[in-house]
Image (cartoon, rainbow, N blue to C red):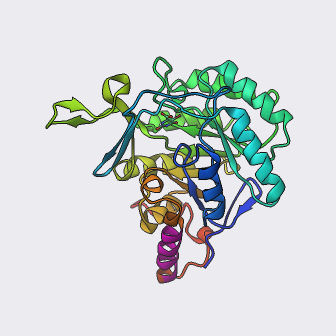
Amino acid sequence: TSLATSIGGRTFGNCMMNAAGIRCQNKKDLDALVASSAGAYVTKSATPQKRAGNPSPRMHTLNKGSINSMGLPNNGLDYYLDYVIDDQHKRPKATNFLSVAGTSLADNLAMLHQIQESEFNGFVELNLSCPNVPGKPQVGYDFDRVNDVLDQVFQFYTKPLGVKLPPYFDLVHFDQIAAILNQYPLTFVNTINSIGNALVVDPRSEQVVIRPKGGFGGIGGASVKPTALANVRGLALRLKPAIAIVGTGGILNGVDVFEHILCGASMVQIGTQFGYEGTKLFDRLSQELKDIMNQKGYTNIEQFRGKLKTFD
Ligand code: RRO
């Protein structure tokens, strides 16, 4: 039974990896991912310069997931670019993901110019959906801005690139975002980022649970799975075949991975649960997915990927 997948002509021995932001901010975290059974890793979303992020508490564990308002704490693009290029020399056959999340168009273009001119040959994941930087709206909810960013990026950027999107909640929005994305030579689309600007209340203390933005933050974990599956499926039905789907959101076990793949995901990313479990998560999920595939008689993921059945 193979859990291998391929995206943009690159193959991955396992279709599971971490989601950006979770246990991938420093070299020690990334070394642990390299040593794990994950098929790839993605680095914490980078800005041009190192950032401390928002004041704590900025993440809180929930019964069915997590809320965070980290505010893009990261070590700056050079740190992650050095790491992935060094890794590329050590493991020339591996493809990994470098996440970038400029807080302005100018920052995104500057970072992509630097990456274009570097030796980096992996995938860039352009994060258009960070919900937690005060005063900076999620680009993914402004369709004209998405179009403008991609138009300017593809004037010069020629390496494989994907975008990380926020969740959409209306079928018209799926139509609109897909029509824009289909105009560009994207390698993948990653859906979903956390469900932004939710509010968790502690009735005992009569207080919010995180400090930034008056308690507003992004939700991840079990409660976002139906929204994630809708976005994976909604985009899989609308994007051109050359754009692969990376499915993220609400994965806790092998069944959740199976459902994401049924909806059309070629790769899945795990955030909240990876935060709770660490790299052994990938061993557990791999075994659980293999068990389901064996029960059903599948030997590789292409046999069921995107083949979700509907009533009509
Ligand atoms: O750092 C964060 O606050 C953060 C980011 Br950049 C993101 O894309 N998604 C998220 O839930 N948190």
Question: In the rendered image, which quarter contains the N terminus?
Answer: bottom right
Is residue 287 rendered magenta in the image?
Answer: yes
Q: Is residue 178 visible?
A: yes
Q: Measured from the top left, where is residue 144 in percent x and y?
A: 59, 21
Q: Residue at x 71, y 46 (%)?
A: 187
Q: Measured from the top left, where is residue 171 in percent x and y?
A: 44, 38
Q: Measured from the top left, where is residue 308 in percent x and y?
A: 48, 62
Q: Measured from the top left, where is residue 269 in percent x and y?
A: 54, 53
- Part of the protein shown in magenta: 283-294
Q: Residue furthest left?
A: 204
Considering depth in this image, is 40 or 310 the residue closer to the camera? 40
Instruction: Tell me which secondary structure the magenta stretch mostly adopts.
Output: helix
Q: Residue at x 39, y 50 (%)?
A: 221
Considering depth in this image, is 57 or 296 the residue closer to the camera? 57
Q: Where is 205 relative to 255, above or below?
A: above
Question: In the rendered image, which quarter contains the C terminus?
Answer: bottom left
Q: Is residue 158 left or right of residue 52?
A: right
Considering depth in this image, is 304 or 13 the residue closer to the camera? 13
Q: Where is 220 relative to 113, above or below?
A: below
Q: Is residue 238 visible?
A: no
What is the number of callouts on the image? 0
Q: Is residue 240 left or right of residue 237?
A: right
Considering depth in this image, is 57 or 110 the residue closer to the camera? 57
Q: Residue furthest front?
A: 28
Q: Is residue 5 left or right of residue 56?
A: right
Is residue 109 rendered magenta in the image?
Answer: no
**Residue 178 lies in what quarter of the image?**
top right
